Structures are given as C-alpha cells and as structure tokens.
Image (cartoon, rainbow, N blue to C red):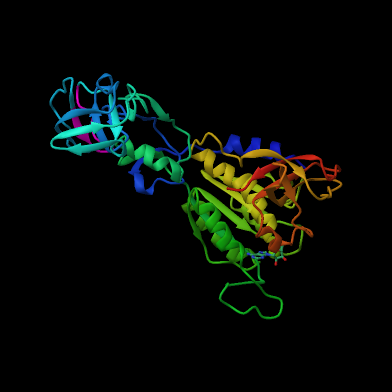
Amino acid sequence: MISISEALKIIENQVGKLKAETIDLVEAVGRVLAETVKADMDLPPFNRSQMDGFALKSKDTKDAPVNLKIIGESVAGKGFDGRMKSGESVRIMTGARLPEGADAVQKVELTEENDGFAEITEAAKSGQHINLLASEIKSGTKIFGAGEIINEQMIAAIASFGYAKIKVFKRPKIAILSTGTEIVGISEMPQKDQIRNSNSIMLKIFAGKYGDSKSLPTVKDDVESLTAAIENALENYDVLVTTGGVSVGDYDFTKTVLRDLGAEIFFEKISLKPGKPTVFAKRNNCLVFGLPGNPVSSAVTFYLFARTAILRMQSANNCELRKGFAIVASKIKAAKERDSVLPALVATNAKGELIIESLRFNGSSNFIAFARANALVFVPQGKSLEIGDVAEIMFLP
Ligand code: AMP
Ligand code: MG
C-alpha cells in the first residue's frame, strides 16, 4: 500500500500538459489562465469625481459660504474641456472628468444654485471627492498570472482591461464509465438486486467543472463489454474515470481488462479510507482512474486524485483541494491501518473558530451524509481525533 502523497507524486509524473487556446471571456470561468492579464490603461483614466456637485478650486471656498460662477458642466462620458479660473465652478456628475484648474468637488447637498452662480455653503478640502488618475491601477500592472483558475469574481477585472478573448489551457476530454451488473439508470425503478447509478452523473458534474466530461453508457461486470467500453475510452479521451470493479471480488474485472488492453498500472492500493482499491493506470496519453464503486469512495478519490490530475494537465498553480486547519467538535475515529479522508462539515462557532462538525459518517457507504459535506478531514492512521484537536482539512470546491 502506498500513501496518499506517494500516489499524488506518481500521478504528477505521468500527467501530460495540454496546450493553450483562446476562448471568449464569457466561457472562461473554471478555466486555467495561460497568459498574464495586465492593465492596458490607467484606472481611473482621468481625475474622476466621486460625487454629483461642483468642481472648484478649494482655496476659493476658504471663507464659505461663497458664490462661484458656473461656467459649464462635466458629465460622465463628456467632460468639460475648458480651464477653470479662480471664482469659477463647473457642475459635475459622479464619474465625470474633473476640469483642468479644479482641485476639489463639493457635493450638491452643500451647494445652492441661483442665477448662474453656485453658492458653496461649506469649505472644500483640496482633493476631496476625487479619485486621482491611476489611483486604482497603473497601466502595465500585472493583475493575474498564468496558472490561476479563473473564477466568477475575476471576470470584471479581466474585462476592464479589454480581454474579450483570453488565452487558457485546453481542457481534457474526460470519460466517465460506471461499471456493475447491478447498476440501472436514475429514472428506472431498481428491481431485486439492482441499484441506481448515482456515480456517473456525480462524476460527470465534478469532472465538468474543469474538464469536458461525458458519461458513457454503463457496462455490466463482463469482460467483453468492459473491454469494448474501456478500449473506446482509451482511444478517444484524455482521462477515463471508471467506478466499480476494482476490489478483489470474482466479478471485479477492471484491472484485468486494463492490463489486457496494454495499459500500465501504476498503483492499485492506497492507504486510504474510503478508497483503498483505487487504481491509476495509463495507456499512451490517456490517464485512467479506476475508482471504487461506493459513491463516497468515488467522490473522495475523485477529489484527491482525478481532480488534481485534471488541473495539473492544465498547468494550474493549485491543483489540490485548498487545505486548512479546524478544531474537531466531535470525536472522529481513525482506521487502524489506513489514513482516512472523511467528508466533513466545517463551520464557524460563536468564538470565531473554525470547527469540524461530525457528519455521522457510518462507513464509506454513507453517501447521504456526504451530501452535506463542504470539506474533507484528514485522520491519520491509528490516531483518532478528539474534541478540541486541530485537524487538517481540505475544502471542497
Ligand atoms: P464495487 O466497487 O463494484 O465493489 O461496488 C461497491 C459498492 O458501490 C456496491 O454496493 C455497488 O452497488 C455500489 N456502486 C457501484 N457502482 C455504483 C454506481 N455507479 N452508483 C451507485 N452505487 C454504485
Ligand atoms: Mg461491482
């Protein structure tokens, strides 16, 4: 048996890197940046008013109230082009360019307009209510770098600098193949000995976050159909994720078939609960993750291994789940001979601490508890976690 980190190292050594492509920014969430995003202009691009009011020279308002002659207006999108002299003011709107000669804005609430004059009722300080040119960002500043995964919050910043199209790494084509004679579709009513296929849709969605995922028709536990399905996937996809058929039962054929098809198996046993029989193999450029059929085992092993590989193929900076620490709020039992990675609910308490709430995880088949998980908690082999212990967690994406 190898450790989780040894397994990750082996996978890292086998991952091929995908090339870059240019796509529309609107399609870019979840993609890995393949270029540096830089500011192509100063922001703001001019001294900009933060308020509706009057642009003026602050020294003119020292002895407020004072009356300043209104010589024009500056509107967002159409600024005032003249130069202001002492004793003058320009009506200005939020977002509009500050006229030359002005050094402050007084807000409209502190002014009164009569007969072409603005009465400024309160003195203005130099620079008030103005965002100076380039105070937000200077042209040429690096905003994001290659390897960052683009998220929703980054879109406006990228768009501001003109990237209607963006260079990202290509996504792998990922096939999901659930195996098992007992598996039926989710719209079917399982008959005696049957169970619905929850893995295919779950893994298609997990994999679809960072890849181009497709769920293949399920196959029964027979060598012939398994061989045909796996051969097809090895030829046509960058990644194949299978579930089921990797244990030591008489009808667990996945490994035999992979070997017969010429795939090299790099590991088939990890010190991990759930997920001990996880298989990692490769043929030509296709990586294969043979995950156990149990839904929680498939989910955990997908997150730990397949997700990491999928992001590594795209040269992401952070391929593994984000790690952190939290305080154990209810005892979590260790496994004697394996490290455990268990679904957990991480929350804050009234003291401002991050705590791990038990999901009453009753063995690897408890996939209903998994539905509430927002993290995984690491429980080292043989070392149960007691209330108050600090444990390592991984946040689910
Ligand atoms: P296996 O890894 O094939 O030994 O399967 C382990 C357990 O997971 C068995 O109880 C299976 O019925 C269940 N299982 C296998 N494949 C799926 C699937 N696609 N969806 C839901 N449960 C599954
Ligand atoms: Mg099976």
The correct choice, above or below, for 198 with respect to 348 in the image is: below
Q: In the drawing, does residue 193 fall left or right of residue 161?
A: right
Question: At x 58% / y 46%, what residue is drawn?
Answer: 307
> Residue 229, position in %: x, y?
54, 61
* Front-lying residue, 384 or 40: 40
Question: At x 30% / y 26%, what residue is drawn?
Answer: 42
Is the stretch drawn in magenta largely helix, strand or loop?
loop
Q: Which residues are magenta?
A: 89-100
> Residue 250, position in %: x, y?
75, 63
The correct choice, above or below, for 65 with respect to 350 in the image is: above
Question: At x 49% / y 52%, what residue is drawn?
Answer: 235
Q: Quadrant of residue 145?
A: top left
Q: Is residue 256 visible?
A: no
> Residue 133, position in %: x, y?
30, 25
Quadrant of ligand 2 in image: bottom right
* Front-lying residue, 253 or 396: 396
Q: Per the image, is 390 magenta?
A: no
